[in-house]
Amino acid sequence: MSSTVSYSLQDNIGVINVNNPPVNALSHAVRQGLLDAITTAQSDASEAVVIVCEGRTFIAGADITEFGKPLQSPWLPELLDTIEASTKLVVAAIHGTALGGGFETALAAHYRCAIPSAKVGFPEVKLGLLPGAGGTQRTPRLAGVKASLDLITTGAPITAGQAEKIGLIDKIIDGDLQEGAINWVKELIADGVPIRRSSEQAVPDYEASIFDDYRAALEKRARGQIAPARIVSAVEAAATSTFEDGLAVERELFMECMGSSQSAGMRHLFFAERQASKIDGLAKDTPKRPVASVGIIGGGTMGGGIAMSFANAGIPVTMIEISDEALQRGLSIIERNYAGSVKRGKISEDKAVACRALISGSTDYAALADVDMVVEAVFEDPDLKKKIFTQLDAVCKLGAILATNTSYQDVNAIAAATSRPEDVIGMHFFSPAHIMKLLEVVRGEKTADDVLATVMALAKKIRKVAVVSGVCYGFIGNRMLRPYGKTAQLLLLEGASPQQVDAAMETWGMAMGPMRVFDLAGLDIGYSARKALTDEQKGDPRSYRVPDLLVEAGRLGQKSGAGFYAYDDKRRAIPDPAVDELIAAAAAEFGMERREISDDEIVDRLISALVDEGRKILDEGIAQRSSDIDVVYIYGYGFPVSRGGPMFYADQQ
Ligand code: 3H9
């Protein structure tokens, strides 16, 4: 057949076997192999056909590396039409993740079975796309409009059991999948079950207002992305026209999305995220240390979030605090967070109880004697951190990994406080640590290769996206934030208002404008950090005059009810004329004439500030590659995913 697809007859059942590691993506060779196999099956001795996959998963989608290149026949929609048109019964047998074009292949089969652990879904929206091989047309015919809109607009996969409930899977197979699928097909034949083509089913009844309701709801969530609304239109076409006409609508919308800069940015992120886990110069088979237990120093917001990240992955945690009172406070915050997650439907009550049970506490460092790893998460005091690492050096077993969650400090200096700097590494989590996906892994001068490899693998286990950074003040993300913040302050003095700066950046796609970020973080933090710096280190006085004046006026940000904005009791930011006056007075101090500033100028100057610093970070070798910087900014700083990250965006410009 082809090197990636084989076909054989087993007891008169034609078995099409796809074998294209790692995820059986629908490359040209796979599409051709499937076409050849289904064509052969039409005229051989087979009574029915089973499509099954080797390796860890059923087909996980179209081959994304082929996107943007010239199309090679057979194109997936044509192939799926041929599969569906088969005059012999076709069954898809699913394990792993049947995603995107992979699930569309399964929907073109006449029936679907899956093992209980299998998942199915349409992640295309996360690539700025919509299913482009009939997914928006066949799914509503089987599962109805609402379930289809939920599945395709969120991109979140569902379990085989959930898919069975909504009609997308017909049978759950326990035990060996291929054997079970063949036996099931034999039963279908024996029972005279007819061929059932998804495209020939009628879309079940639905609420007339559903499409407008989804459009309205998605507009708020989509942050300017075009794909979600296009998905609604494609599903609407399925419900209101023939299969062929709906398919034509889907194709047109798919091509529009595929050609958009948004999808280019999101596809860039897909590969950037996977590339980030690879470390230049480190062999793939670098041995890893076992990490079966973790200690956390500090039970504050950060320490608690980090503890939850490990516990959620089944790793027991011992949390250390200085007093019983502080420990109880820390543990009760964790409890509240779990209760909140249960209330919001993020995890089940049972899972929350099981995870919480994995977190214990102590006020004695001796409790860390046997843990495989410690993450220090106390406040940013370099002397305190060094003292803690000296203590850890004294109590922890040999080979334990000693990590610091510092956001700024010199990891090499912290490592030097121990007799084993090769075991020391930075793990910079982002707050709230149990939710934010980014983890900056800071490689010290002496960090051992196996420590780095272990932490990168562990990051994946605790469901973080890890990016390696070298040692410098602020590492990748916070270092870039400084010139960004300074430029934002200059824009205020030059004539913009906080609300104009924020609105310009949020309209452009940032999750939150810089002034609201400062207010959320607390203006007093930067204020006290500046106190410790020389004038030279502080830089241009115009870049911090306004926040200094705000703090001195008691406006510390959201927590004090006022900062760059006033805040009401629901923590809504309200533009405040007193701040405008304060900015005007500060500008006058520097003899600056204020002027009208356009939103475009705001965006240009702020993004340029990020990109310029990003280039320096690359030149200095702090980041391994420019796409790593994009991953940091998207996962840690609310940069719009549809713009692919600051460095990708700059390249596109
Ligand atoms: C689509 O189907 C459009 C159609 O509707 C219409 C067409 C006309 N292509 O993530 P991992 C690589 S859009 C090419 O670390 P895991 C990946 O880069 C597609 N390569 O594994 C990595 O390479 P490397 C819809 C792919 O076990 C390696 O495989 N489908 C693809 O953590 C391992 O990946 C999706 O969006 C691909 N489709 O997770 C699914 N997928 O080793 C995207 C993966 O060189 N994939 N690779 O770094 C995933 O979500 C995850 O890979 C999956 C496995 C859950 C499957």
Image: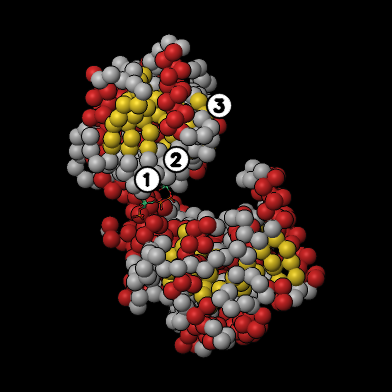
The residue beneath circle 2 is 97
Location of the N terminus by quadrant is: top left
Could you tell me the amino acid type at mark 2? Thr
- 247 or 319, which lies in front? 319
The residue beneath circle 1 is 23
Residue at the image position 46 percent from the left and 23 percent from the top: 184
The residue beneath circle 3 is 165
- 581 or 231, which lies in front? 231
* Residue extending furthest toward the right: 325
- 415 or 560, which lies in front? 415
Could you tell me the amino acid type at mark 3? Lys
**Image position of 272 (left or right of 208):** left
Q: Is mark 1 within 8 Å of ligand 1?
A: yes
Could you tell me the amino acid type at mark 1? Val
Q: Are marks 3 and 1 in contact (CB under 8 Å)?
A: no
CA distance separating discs 2 and 1 = 9 Å
Picture layout, residue 625 above or below residue 472: above
Q: Are marks 2 and 1 in contact (CB under 8 Å)?
A: yes
Residue at the image position 45 percent from the left and 37 percent from the top: 95
**Image position of 363 (left or right of 374):** right
Residue 564: x, y in percent?
Answer: 57, 65
Please tell me whether mark 2 sits on a helix, a strand or a loop: strand
Residue 173: x, y in percent?
Answer: 51, 30
Residue 86: x, y in percent?
Answer: 30, 19
Q: Residues within 10 Å of mark 1 (few under 14, many from 20)?
A: many
Q: What colour scheme does the image use?
A: secondary structure
Q: Is mark 2 within 8 Å of ligand 1?
A: yes
Residue 515: x, y in percent?
Answer: 53, 63
Residue at the image position 46 percent from the left and 72 percent from the top: 450
Sequence order check, earlier mark of 3 and 1 = 1
Q: Which mark is residue 35?
A: none
